[in-house]
Each structure stands twice: as C-alpha cells, then as structure tokens.
Amino acid sequence: MDHIDILGTPIPNAGPVFFAALAIHVTAGITCVSCGAIAALTRKESPLHRRFGRVYLWAWAVVYLTLTVMSAIRWRENVHLFVIGTLGFAAALTGYANRRRRPDLHILAMGASYVLVLTGFYVDNGPHLPLWDRLPTVAYWLLPALIGFPLIARAIARRRHRRAPAQA
C-alpha cells in the first residue's frame, strides 16, 4: 500500500473513508489530550474540572469510534492500536462512572485512559517525531506509563491526605 506524506508523516493511502476518519480522529485526539490535561490540572469538583472532563470523555468516544473505523479498514496494521484504544476508552468510561462513588478509582481510571491515549499516539507516530525518532521502539510503549503512573499515584495520595484530617 502506498503512503501520502503530510508534514513529514507517512499516512496510509487507504481510501477516502480512512482519510476522513483520520482527519476526525486527529482533531478529536488533540481535543482529548488538551482537555484531559486541563481537567487533570484544575481543582477537583470545580465546574471547570467537570466541563473539561466531560469534553475529554466525548473526545475519547470520537477517538475510539474513528479508531474502530480505521482498524476495520486496516486490521492487520492497526490491531495493536485497537487494543490500546479499547483499554483506554474502557478506562475512561470506568473513571467517569466512578467520579462520585469511588474517587480513587476515578483518578486511577481517568489517568490510565490518558496514559493509554498517549501510548497509542506515540506507538503510532513516535518513529516520525523529532527526538522520539531516536528512541527505541519499547520507549513508545513504556514512557507514557513510566511518567504517568507516578503522577496518578501522587494525585491519589494527595487526595487521601487532604481527606484524612477532615475525617478525623
């Protein structure tokens, strides 16, 4: 299969449906990553946190829908990305479902969904990105988790620490 070069990144020439899904996928992915970061950095339970968290979840849904379309078209090449996406979207749904009842699970699941969206991005695009193109392939799979999970653990510990004096 031939490729189309867009800004130095080879894009599979898999037809107009694939290309349309990819255009929507990229837009939703940028929205997902930016809104997820804003939600993570804003005060929890604030209107801003809730608003950006909802946009993050809806953007994740669009990412997953378009990923499903692109994976159906190029299954052999995308099955690993489909698995990452399925786990990530399931984590986002789990986090959203537990936002009130189990806040630690909310933080863990939403954080894991963010790590997985970044993992999918780097696994697919890392070899074409400046500096990332110098890393071994295993780095694309592991670096988001090696950076993300300590931050998630810190967020859970901080939440527990803030709650402890109030409960005493």
Image (tube, rainbow, N blue to C red):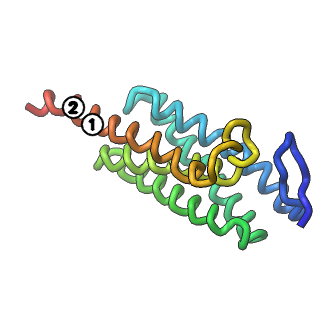
Reading the image, the residue beneath label 1 is 157
Neighbourhood count class around disc 2 (C-alpha, 10 Å): few under 14, some 14–19, many 20 upward: few
SS at circle 1: helix
Amino acid type for the residue under numbered disc 1:
Ala
Q: Which residue has dot 2 on it?
A: 161
- Counting from the top left corner in percent of width and height, residue 48 is at 48, 28
The Cα atoms of the two marked residues, 2 and 1, are separated by 6 Å
Secondary structure under the numbered disc 2 in the rendered image: helix
**Nearer to me, 117 or 128:** 128
Circle 1 packing at 10 Å, graded few (<14), some (14-19), many (20+), is: few
Of the pair 137 and 114, the residue shown nearer to us: 137
Residue 8 horizontal side relative to residue 120, left or right = right
Name the amino acid type tagged 2.
Answer: His
Task: Kindly identify the residue that appears in the image at 91 percent across and 53 percent down.
Answer: 4
Locate residue 53 relative to residue 12 in the image: left or right.
Answer: left
Q: Are marks 2 and 1 in contact (CB under 8 Å)?
A: yes
- Identity of the residue drawn at 68% across and 47% down: 126
- Residue 18: x and y in percent read 82, 61
